[in-house]
Amino acid sequence: MKTLLISFIALASAAAEPSCPKGHHWTPWYDRDNPGGTGDWETLVHLRMENPGSICEMPKSIEARLVHNQQPWNPALEIAQMSPLTGFICKNKDQKDKYCQDYEVRFCCPNGPSCPNGHHWTSWYDRDNPSGTGDWETLSHLRMENPGFICKKPNSIEARLVLNQQPWNSAQEVAQMSPLTGFVCKNADQNDKYCQDYEVRFCCPGEPRCPKGHHWTPWYDRDNPSGTGDWETLVNLRAENPGFICKKPKSIQARLVHNQQPWNTAMENVQISPLTGFICKNADQDDDYCQDYEARFCCPGLPPCPTGYYWTEYYDRDDPSDTGDYETLAEIRKEHQSDNICEKPFNVQARLVTNKTSWQTAGDNKIEVDKDIGFVCRSKDQPDNRCNDYEARFCCSLGTWI
């Protein structure tokens, strides 16, 4: 009776499906090993090496099943070790007949491939079509064609189909993918001798970049996380701020409103893209509620000041002292009250005093350029502990001019 009870409990446990909570997804099934040699080794470390970018670093849970009939692994019938952080191992020597069956596994991961705190996803890039020899989304070519936007040594890579934005492996095509080389699908490797069209993005250290010849827009917070969530969408932000955001931004930054920390420090499931904006849906969160975010976009050229607005003159109120160069709106307004500088500028530009070129050409670190603050360069943030000398001007509405 005791043996029957134990068997019943084991069978009931095997029948229960592992949990994959809201905001997570199951990976495809993987079968990397056959039960020859010492057994069937479906280990996470090897599966991640053989399927780069497809399995997260720390899966939430794991599921294993038999390859031949897709029935769940039954611990009452075969002895195995299973853990979401190590994978699934069935050793031949542990079985009564000294032979394991063939298994496949899948893992429960947070939505999207891993790009840890302190890193960011680049934009999606589709530089090649699958004509000729295949689809070549190589890192070397993408960096040349998009100078300043992709780091030299990405942390990870994600690829998807252009047609339906499904993960690349859903197409079941043979491809090579690595964060240090990019994504290559060769027509010759496919059964039908033709690859589908793919796009890729890379996980890079730090915040998204906005290199020389481009500018960050101001931060925008158009929505609060009531209703269905927090929707900082490009289409609505452009409609509400005509003339200030380009049609096709090159990158996007998002951060929490209450502490100005990057969006991914909140550990919420979101959608972020320079071409669509930032979306956090309440329904996608474990607690059914998003935090409040703001977003800004990287656009080509200098910050605009469209029709109905005017640029003030450039102001250079501070020299680069021990603490830095502070061309702040509050201080400039105090010192130039007669100039009628608007209280709430719509944009800001800054440049070097010496040669009148954009502040970005100077190469100083961690510069703060914000329409509500002005321009700030801190000496402690620079390699030589000294800032260059800058001047700033502000874009104001003609309606605010007296």
Image: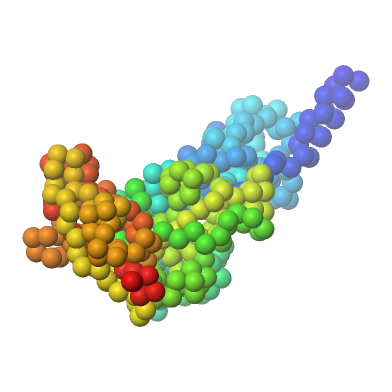
Where residue 374 appears, x then y in whole percent?
29, 56
- Which one is in front, 396 or 240? 396
244 vs 58: above or below: below
**Who's the residue at 13% across and 65% down the image?**
356
In the rendered image, which quarter contains the C terminus?
bottom left
Vertical position of residue 346 compared to residue 255: above or below: below
- What residue is shown at x 45% (from left), y 51% (from top)? 255
Q: How is the image coloured?
A: rainbow
Q: Nearer the viewer, residue 224 or 316?
A: 316
Which of these two is toward me, 42 or 157? 157
The residue sitting at the top extreme is 2
Residue at the image position 39 percent from the left and 47 percent from the top: 119
The reply to whether residue 266 is visible in this rendering is yes
Left or right: residue 130 versus residue 7 is left
Quadrant location of the N terminus?
A: top right
Q: Is residue 372 above or below residue 83?
A: below
Residue 194 x/y as whole percent: 47, 75
Say which quarter of the image contains residue 219: bottom left
- Which residue is at 64% across, 49% downward? 289
Q: Would you say residue 151 is visible in this rendering?
A: no
Q: Could you tell whether 89 is left or right of 395 in the image?
A: right
**Residue 385 falls left or right of residue 129:** left
The location of residue 55, given as percent across then percent down, is: 51, 48
Q: Residue 203, image x and y in percent?
A: 39, 52
| The residue positioned farthest toward the left in the image shown | 354
Q: Is 85 displayed left or right of 198 in the figure? A: right
